[in-house]
Image (cartoon, rainbow, N blue to C red):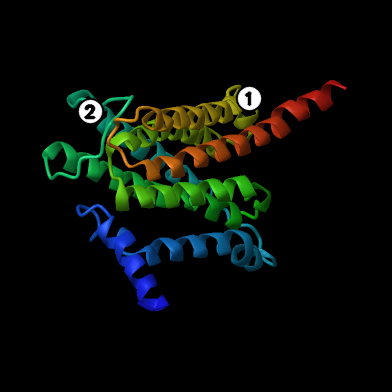
Amino acid sequence: MDALERIHRGYEVIFNELSDPRSTDWFPVSTPVYAIGTLVIYVKFAKDWGPKLMKDREPFDLRRFIVVYNISQILLNAWLFCKGLSWVLRHEYSLWCEPMQYTYSPRELEVVTLTRYYFLLKVYDLLDTVFFVLRKKQNHVSFVHVYHHSGMFLTTWMAVKFLPGGHGFFLAFMNTVVHTIMYTYYLLTSISPEYGKYIWWKKHLTQLQMTQFLLNFIHMALPLVWTDCDYPKWGLWIICPQNIIIFLLFADFYKKTYIDKSHKKGL
């Protein structure tokens, strides 16, 4: 078997044989080309194409559009949280070990559908960056911002492709809560930017996000200790380090934005 045949065989094994049969034919995840292409376009627009496009232009006034966008994010995240909560309450879900079940039962098909909706929401989240670029707020398009959005997009794509449900469902459940609160803050500041100066809980949003990443890490690490848990370990070894990395990046942002600046003001 030559090199090309081995590469083709490896591709078939990873993206066809190992993928979830209930999702493998779904358009956005049927081939990795869509995910890779989206990520390349997103990063290039955020860091290269977008700034060049806006270099000699006035920033776009997107206030009304952003208000509508924030409202839609609140409603979509709250709706998905309620759907997820309903699923958890109607079915037994173990915080210690929720195995993957590749069946076509109503219980499992429902969680596969919820995972798909969550992935589409992460695609929708990429518009945050587009708005920053078009409004010439390039200082907001930081490494942490782009890395976070890219990582969320890629990991949720992998979740739909390989692990739609199981132990990882907790991550989506937590994220919809955080994003409902986060976009509520964004809505208030988009309606009245001056009002943002008086919202006392602004810095606590970052604390909430950091708490989310820490809880996600602990939750996803449990099956590594719980050796009898029938959840693919490779997925855990991807998600756990990702949550630690993003936690540390947000912690560094929090330190520079709130602790260091507060210390300088006190001098």
Above or below 19: residue 44: below
Whether residue 27 appears in this view of the structure is no
For residue 265, the mark is none
User: x, y (%) of residue 57?
Assistant: 66, 65
Residue extending farthest to the left is: 105
Give the position of the N terminus as an image quadrant. bottom left
Disc 1 marks a residue whose amino acid type is Tyr
Q: Dot 1 corresponds to which residue?
A: 198
Please name the residue shown 28% across and 45% down the image. Answer: 164
Image position of 147 (left or right of 217): right
Image position of 56 (left or right of 13): right
Q: Quadrant of residue 26?
A: bottom left
Above or below 158: residue 48: below
User: x, y (%) of residue 131?
Assistant: 54, 53
Give how far apart the Cα atoms at labels 2 and 1 are.
35 Å
> Which of label 2 and label 1 is nearer to you?
2
Please name the residue shown 66% across and 36% down the image. Answer: 253
Q: Quadrant of residue 133?
A: bottom right
Q: Mark 2 or mark 1, which has the lower sequence index?
A: 2
User: x, y (%) of residue 77?
Assistant: 37, 37
Return the residue nearer the eye: 94 or 40: 94
Disc 2 marks a residue whose amino acid type is Ser
Above or below 8: residue 74: above
Q: Dot 2 corresponds to which residue?
A: 86
Q: For label 1, count other residues whose C-alpha is less than 10 Å away and answer few (under 14), some (14-19) or many (20+).
A: few
Which element is circle 2 on? Answer: helix
